[in-house]
Structures are given as structure tokens and as C-alpha cells.
Image (cartoon, rainbow, N blue to C red):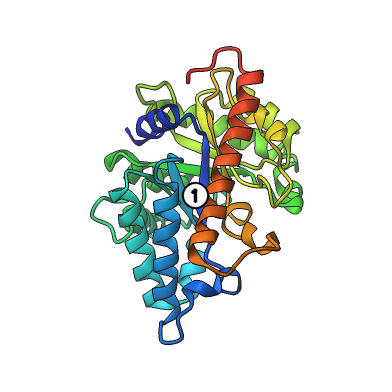
């Protein structure tokens, strides 16, 4: 199962951190922007370099599809090529698209993004649960058939997420807790040999106390943890997202890795220096998070 592949790569690289691929045009270094090159072509060259930098450090990448959709059909072609290239490099691909709908529409989304014969063929994708459980099932069905996985939005990293996640239903239960209970229940049908489920949850790094509560409910489920670094989440904040074996979460950073160069006064506008900065940020994140896990997890599995 794909969850087992993810777990094994995390153990192999001693790294639960992943890198987001978020191509914000005004932040991509000028050294990539040749005057005669269309923007999607530039983004593909840039993303390939990021993947090459990351391949021996991280287990997975997390491309955000919105930054590609803005370029229409050409942007989506680039997205497809990036997914394929990451697979060539042995990386797991977690597609951040937050899709959902009902019935056959949800199934169409799932087939396009998760099916091995689909146009995207990602390993995981993020799914919104707010159309109800029957809207999630088509994604689970396609994921199971194709040995893929999903991450369901439970507690996102943005401040206003509390408006929904911390609201209470008619039984007085917080929405995030109810979703966690649902994921824990259905996810038992998708357990891998690692003991973890291919059905995971998005839980932001910026809410450590809530993450601790949710971890108790979803013990066998991987958390996709956004919000590290640029959004304010620290290594100490994300410890509550993990189990005592140091597994159970992947921590994502995009801006803090991709665009750190903008804070470097002596950046010389060269591609070599830019990629050195990117790689340094990946390694520093790995060391910071792994070091915190080693201090706090009594049964570290790697």
C-alpha cells in the first residue's frame, strides 16, 4: 500500500518533512525567467530543480494544484509532468487540491487524480469533507482500487478554521472531533502492513493542543501537517501530531524552503546559490524536526 511506501521512505531518510511545490511567479528567482520562455515552461524547469534537490532528503513532495491551474491547459500539463518526474525520482506525491463533490462528480475527480490510468496519478490527494460522508466514499473507493490514499481536511492551519472545526454539532461534539472519529472508523478498512491507514487527516501545525486531542482519536492515521515555518508552526508545536514511535505525520513547508532566498542579503542571483539555499533549508528543517522527535518520542522507529 502507498502508506507503507511513505512510512518506509520516512524511516530510510530519517525525515518526516516534505516540501511543497508552490510556484508563485513573482517569487520564483529571476535566473529561471528567460525572456523568450512561457511561464509554464519556466515553472517546469524550476520545479524539476526543486525535486532534484529534494530527492535524497525527503520522502514526498506536495504540489499545490492551484498554482498550476492559473495557467490553464499548459499549467495542468506541467503539473502532470511534475508528478511523473517526482515518481521517476522515487518520491511519493501528495497532491494538494482539496477536491470534493457528490456522487459521480466526486468519482470523476477521484479517477482523474488518483487512478493509475488517470491524467494526474498522484499517490495521495487532499479532500474536503464538508459535503458529507457520502461525498468522501468515491475517493476512498478509487484510492483502494488503485492502492492510493487521501488526506481529509480536519483542522487546517489558517486562523479562521476554528469557525468550522471548533463549532459543535447537535450532540455538543466539536466538528473536528466528529471528523476524526469518522476517519478513525472508516480508516480501519485501509490499514497497511505498517499499521497505518491510507486514510489520513490534514491537521495544521499552528494548533498544537487541538492536534494532541485529535491524535488520541486517530492513532493509526497519518497527519498531513501544513503551517510549519512561514505560517508560524515550530518543531515543538508539531510534536503532538506524532505518535510515540516518531511516525504518524508528515510536516510540510513551502515558502520557508522555496523562497528563503528572498531574505538572504548576499544572494547573487545565480541558480547555484538559490538551489544551495533551498537544499540548506530542507536539511535544517529535517534536523530541527527529527531532533525534536528524538528528544520526545520514547519508541522512535527510525
Residue 42 in the figure: left or right of residue 255: left
Give the image quarter of residue 8. top left
Q: Residue at 35% x, 36% y: name it.
A: 2
Q: Residue at 32% x, 38% y: name it.
A: 144
Of residue 288 and residue 20, the one placed in the foreground of this image is 288
On the image, the x and y values in percent for residue 169 come to 71, 40
The residue that mark 1 highlights is 126
Categorize mark 1 by other alpha carbons within 10 Å: few (<14), some (14-19), many (20+).
many
Q: Image quadrant for the N terminus?
A: top left
Residue 46 sits above or below residue 19 on the image: below
On the image, the x and y values in percent for residue 60 come to 43, 44
Residue 105 in the figure: left or right of residue 21: left
Residue 52 in the figure: left or right of residue 170: left
On the image, the x and y values in percent for residue 154 come to 61, 42
Residue 55 sits above or below residue 180 on the image: below
**Residue 243 in view, yes or no:** yes
On the image, the x and y values in percent for residue 81 come to 32, 63
Q: Residue at 60% x, 74% y: name it.
A: 26
Of residue 84 and residue 264, the one placed in the foreground of this image is 264
Amino acid at each position: 500500500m502507498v502508506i507503507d511506501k511513505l512510512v518506509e521512505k520516512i524511516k530510510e531518510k530519517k525525515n518526516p518533512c516534505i516540501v511543497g511545490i508552490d510556484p508563485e511567479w513573482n517569487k520564483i528567482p529571476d535566473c529561471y525567467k528567460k525572456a523568450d520562455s512561457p511561464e509554464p515552461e519556466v515553472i517546469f524547469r524550476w520545479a524539476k530543480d526543486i525535486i532534484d534537490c529534494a530527492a535524497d532528503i525527503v520522502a514526498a513532495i506536495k504540489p499545490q494544484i492551484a498554482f498550476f491551474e492559473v495557467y490553464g491547459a499548459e499549467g495542468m500539463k506541467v503539473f502532470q509532468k511534475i508528478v511523473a518526474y517526482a515518481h521517476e525520482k522515487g518520491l511519493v506525491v501528495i497532491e494538494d487540491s482539496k477536491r470534493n463533490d457528490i456522487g459521480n462528480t466526486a468519482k470523476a475527480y477521484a479517477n482523474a487524480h488518483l487512478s493509475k490510468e488517470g491524467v494526474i496519478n498522484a499517490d495521495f490527494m487532499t479532500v474536503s469533507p464538508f459535503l458529507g460522508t457520502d461525498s468522501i466514499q468515491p475517493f476512498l473507493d478509487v484510492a483502494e482500487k488503485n492502492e492510493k490514499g487521501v488526506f481529509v481536511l480536519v483542522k487546517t492551519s489558517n486562523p479562521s478554521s476554528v469557525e468550522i472545526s471548533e463549532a459543535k454539532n447537535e450532540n455538543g461534539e466539536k466538528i473536528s472531533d466528529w471528523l476524526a472519529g469518522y476517519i478513525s472508523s472508516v480508516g480501519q478498512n485501509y490499514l497497511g502492513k505498517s499499521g497505518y491507514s491510507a486514510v489520513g487527516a490534514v491537521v495544521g501545525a499552528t494548533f498544537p493542543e487541538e492536534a494532541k486531542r485529535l491524535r488520541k482519536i486517530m492513532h493509526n492515521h497519518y497527519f498531513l501537517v501544513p503551517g510549519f515555518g512561514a505560517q508560524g508552526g515550530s518543531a515543538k508545536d508539531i510534536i503532538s501530531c506524532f505518535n510515540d514511535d516518531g511516525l504518524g505525520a508528515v510536516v510540510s513547508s513551502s515558502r520557508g524552503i522555496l523562497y528563503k532566498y528572498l531574505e538572504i542579503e548576499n544572494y547573487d542571483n545565480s541558480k547555484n546559490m538559490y538551489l544551495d539555499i533551498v537544499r540548506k533549508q530542507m536539511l535544517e528543517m529535517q534536523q530541527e524536526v527529527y531532533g525534536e522527535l528524538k528528544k520526545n518520542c520514547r519508541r522512535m522507529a527510525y
